[in-house]
Image (cartoon, rainbow, N blue to C red):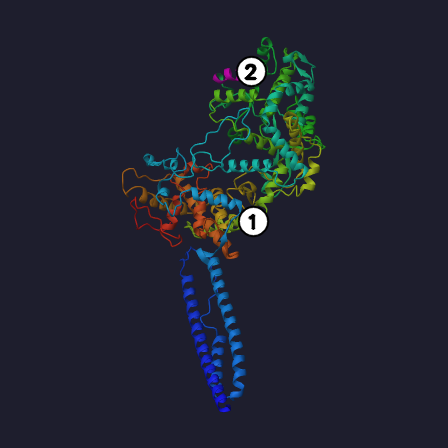
Amino acid sequence: MAAAGGGSTRETTNEKDKDVHAFRKTQQEDMLRMRESQRELERATLSQSEPERPLQPPPLYQLPLPTQDPSETQQQAQLQYELQLSEHRPQTKRVWVIGWRLLLLLLLGFSFCAAILGLIYYSQFQTRRTNQAGIEYRCLTPVCRSASDRLAMSADPFTHPCDYFLFTCGSDRYSPRSRGMQRGKGLPGRPLDQKVKVAGPQESTPNKGLGLRDKNTLDRRAVLLQYLSEMLESNDRPDSTAVQKARQFYHSCLDTRSIETAGAEPFLALIQKLGGWAVSGQWNQTDFNSTLSTLMKDYATFPFFSLRVGRDPNEITRGRTKRYIQIDQPDVLIPIEWNNKTQKSKAKTEKLRPFLASCQRYLALLGSPPSSSMIHVGVFISLSSELAVAATPLHHRLSKGQLYRRMTIRELQSRAPAIDWLRCLRAAFHPLALIEDDLVLLHNLPYIEQMSHIIGKWLTHELRNSGPLHTYMIFHLLHTLMPALDSRFSETANDLSVALGNSEGVAPRWEQCVLETERGFDFVLRDLLRERAENREVEDMVQNIFSSFKAKLHEFRWKDHTSLQFVMKKVQALISKLWITNYISNASELDPLFSKVSVGTQNFFSSYVQLLSLWQRRRSKLLTEQTDAADILSVTSFLLGDELLVPMGMFVPPFFHPTYPRAMNYGVIGFLIAKDILHLLLPDINSQSEAVYDVGECVWTHYLSVTQKAGQAGAFSLSAAQQQEVWVQYSALQIALQAYYRSLQEHPGDTSISGLSHTRLFLTSFTQVNCDSDPYSQLMPLEPSFLITVICAKSDLCPTKLHCHNRTQQHTLKTC
């Protein structure tokens, strides 16, 4: 029995040894198969998408996956060695050793499986991070989803290239024999013309769209006004008292029903407060300078001259920031024209009849008896004509050197004695303590002297008891307060405008209300807008665009090395920055500024009068500030001394948003900033470089090659202005793209919209704004979207080649 038992034990042990060997062999085969699967997974991952090869793309880093782990090799050798030793070990220890080894193998197998799963996850994670040229993940914020919808509705240049050979921004675009290019009508997501409508009494908040001007032209200023209106209409978070008052003012402006109900009564009450007027038969014979100073202080009305605050350009170059009161001729109400032969202004005779009718209509709305209104209208037109003849256009004053004439208030008083200058200027700039020795700048001294003579004559005129000067001032006050009066007054003004030949319609009510709110609550809106503009990405974008612009200058073909040095010296002296005023920094400073303002929700006239008072205080502060106040309605970069200032108003949706992928922000705002810079410095570059002509002709040659056969009748050359605009927009697109690559080098990684890769999203976003409405847009002889075709034609920058099979293309074209 013992022998039999011993034999059974040995047979059991041998069977266990065979099982161990079989298990280990199976484990090794499984390990080899898993490693082979991992290598296949790695090869599949790396071949999923072909990466883009931009002009200077940022390096895309991806950690290599290991093909063999050294620790695993050592483990296999150790296991083989232990298998060999196990044949010679005592049989009494084999059971314990086998159990221990089985446990060890189980642990190793578990660890190996965990490592494999980790490698697979890491590989897939890296694939998500590096797939499509470095995109980390899709942007899913609400604004990104809206942007994705807009992209989906627009023709994609990479899937519909033929649309971008013939697409136009506007129907009035210059074109050779019209080229059959009215295809913008049929493109998806491109609305037709949106005419400006006259805002009626019930039309308070019409559909504002996306700032579309003509068919497909995005108007930067219209987009900004729409964004400001959305901020004023929003109640998504608790606001300061100043912000609440700004929003109440805006909503009371939109309440046209209350304005219509009030009618002309608020203005008639104001006339009585000013001493009445002879038109109604009740006038207190108020003092001329007393009434004038009151209108300037409390109602921002300047009937006989205009006031503004600003620096002397002759001192800007010397670094001085002092501001002066600047006095100029006013905006005359009567229609006038300039005679180049006589070098004088005169009233337009053929336009006097509709002007006379409008004046009579105003008096009728204010309750004037028809029997007496004609006399007062006649005197008003006579006085207006005399003052209009003394006015001269800006170009004439520039040629005569009449701008920025410096003198003291005392000297001005002696040259134009009819106006009590110190009294009126103190009222306009209250509470500043002005003195007679303070300097002012005159922009048309001959007009000021003639104006004083005319006022002196009417003060002693035989009709002086009928108050001609007082009536003249009341008419100007009426035009100042017309936005706060019922629609009958605005309709009368619109009818006169049409009769005088102005075809532009009246802006919609919401837009008027935004402009009026900004006029009095500019600090409030500036603070709200600054929250969006003041972030690191905006500052980086401005600097990257300017740096890429300077780098681009070295690529141009210059007349000689001295020419490059001349331009670079001027450019290097410029400081590019975002235009932000530091006067108001937070709500704690805003609230006290508007503490005395009481805004009613159903009395817009009263609120509007307080707005004019706010504007007077703002004008006083401008005189003592040391920095230029940022104009939030500015949407174009500009030069001020040695500063290149980019306005905050450019950084609003749908052009820009902090959560957009950088590719989208650079493709839109980056392009617009670069275009502004090139326009500002175009005269210097064009005078010293051949690049403008070379690039303009090169791009035009590309365009002709796909729109008509070479040498076909009708082909023509570009004018100098057209060449310049082609160069500006093509170079701006290149600069913006290079700046985007610079941002990727500094901060690798970017988000995506609609699954588009970096470069493709950049170029596709550019197509959303390529029809930008700037003063130069009409000079562009081809569709800006076509510039993408030129960039992609001779480089491996784009994800796919752009070929329109419906057009003849020349394949020997050079890179522009």
Label 1: which residue? Answer: 539
Magenta span includes 355: yes
Q: From the viewer's perspective, is 789 left or right of 441?
A: left
Q: Secondary structure at mark 1?
A: helix
Identify which residue, 60 or 369, lies in the foreground.
60
Magenta stretch: helix, strand or loop mostly: helix
Mark 1 neighbour density, 10 Å: few (under 14) some (14–19) many (20 or more): some
The image position of residue 566, as x and y in percent, is 48, 49
Residue 226 appears in the picture as rendered: yes
Identify which residue, 428 or 448, lies in the foreground.
428
Above-or-below relation of 233 to 1: above
The image position of residue 732, as x and y in percent, is 45, 46
Mark 2 neighbour density, 10 Å: few (under 14) some (14–19) many (20 or more): some
Kindly identify the amino acid type of the residue bearing the numbered disc 1. Answer: Glu
Magenta-colored span:
350-362
Residue 361, disc? 2
Q: Secondary structure at mark 2?
A: helix
